[in-house]
Image: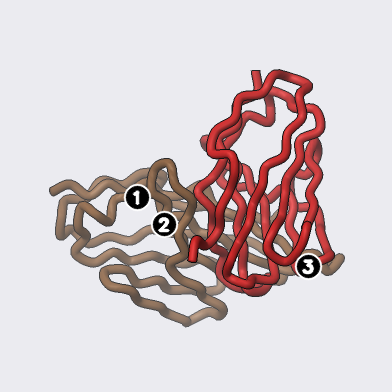
Chain colours: A red, B brown
Amino acid sequence: NAGVTQTPKFQVLKTGQSMTLQCAQDMNHNSMYWYRQDPGMGLRLIYYSASEGTTDKGEVPNGYNVSRLNKREFSLRLESAAPSQTSVYFCASSEAPYYEQYFGPGTRLTVT
Amino acid sequence: EDQVTQSPEALRLQEGESSSLNCSYTVSGLRGLFWYRQDPGKGPEFLFTLYSAGEEKEKERLKATLTKKESFLHITAPKPEDSATYLCAVQGLGASGTYKYIFGTGTRLKVLA
């Protein structure tokens, strides 16, 4: 039982490049989330998926897109990376929207 | 405006020295308040959920309490392994029916042996 897994663990991009962050959970959870964590800012919600087939914007969605591929997988795409997107990205899942969330180990992204 | 404020930002305790961390919040449509622990370089780890004022939860040396405006995480006789950043988060329901998830910036706790 791996919980929430994220790939890659580290990534360096040049401005304008694109990439997809992958997330998978094996807890049969319905809801999944993408956050970014920056020093002094705390965790901020980018997008969430309350259930399979639905996605909604969070607090900071600009520059990102998401896909809920199936119940297990929720990916985050940066179409044209910018230095302001340098951050640590966490994926999380929960049984339902008002339940506790379980987090992955994070992806450290640097955009130069 | 919805927000979560945690205090203090950092706290140093001697082993065995009890203290409390504070999380004050303003959010419309509160559905739950959560405490997480985060170790350096790792994702947050769930500790407690509180749903209504007056509710209390305990786990080993930690006890979380909730009022209508704030939550406290009490740490009794802490040990060095309790050193971590403790995050508070609130979940609410927006006017348009979308969910809101707001995290505080955390309290960095260091327990000295």
Helix, strand or loop at mark 1: strand
* Amino acid beneath label 2: Arg
CA gap, disc 1 and disc 2: 6 Å
Left or right: B16 as drawn, with respect to A55: left
- The image's mark for residue B32 is none
The residue pinned by badge 3 equals A52
Q: Amino acid at mark 1?
A: Ala
Which chain letter goes with mark 1?
B
Q: Is residue A46 above or below residue B77?
A: above
Chain under label 3? A
Single out the residue that lies furthest toward the front: A1
Few, some or many residues within 10 Å of mark 1 (<14, 14–19, 20+): some
Q: Is residue A101 above or below residue B39?
A: below
Q: Nearer the viewer, mark 1 or mark 3?
A: 3
Mark 3, Cα crowd under 10 Å, few <14 / some 14-19 / many 20+, is some
Q: Which mark is residue B37?
A: 2
Q: Residue at x 22, y 60 (%)?
A: B78
Q: Please report the residue visible at 41 percent of the width from the left and 66 percent of the height from the top.
A: B72
> Mark 1 sits on what residue?
B84
Asked if both marks, 1 and 2, belong to the same chain, the answer given is yes
Q: CA distance from mark 1 to mark 3?
A: 34 Å
Point 77% across, 29% down: residue: A18
Vertical order, B31 against A65 (above or below): below
Answer above or below: position of B13 versus A88. below
Q: Is A73 on the left-hand or right-hand side of B106?
A: right
Query: Which residue corresponds to the image point at 80% horizontal and 52% vertical from the top-left?
Result: A67
Which percent across, then down, holds residue B23? Answer: 48, 59
For marks 1 and 2 on the same chain, the one whose residue lies earlier in the sequence: 2
Mark 1 and mark 2 residues within 8 Å of each other at the beta carbon: yes
Q: Could you tell me residue A20's position as x and y percent?
A: 72, 39
Which amino acid type is shown beneath numbered disc 3?
A: Glu
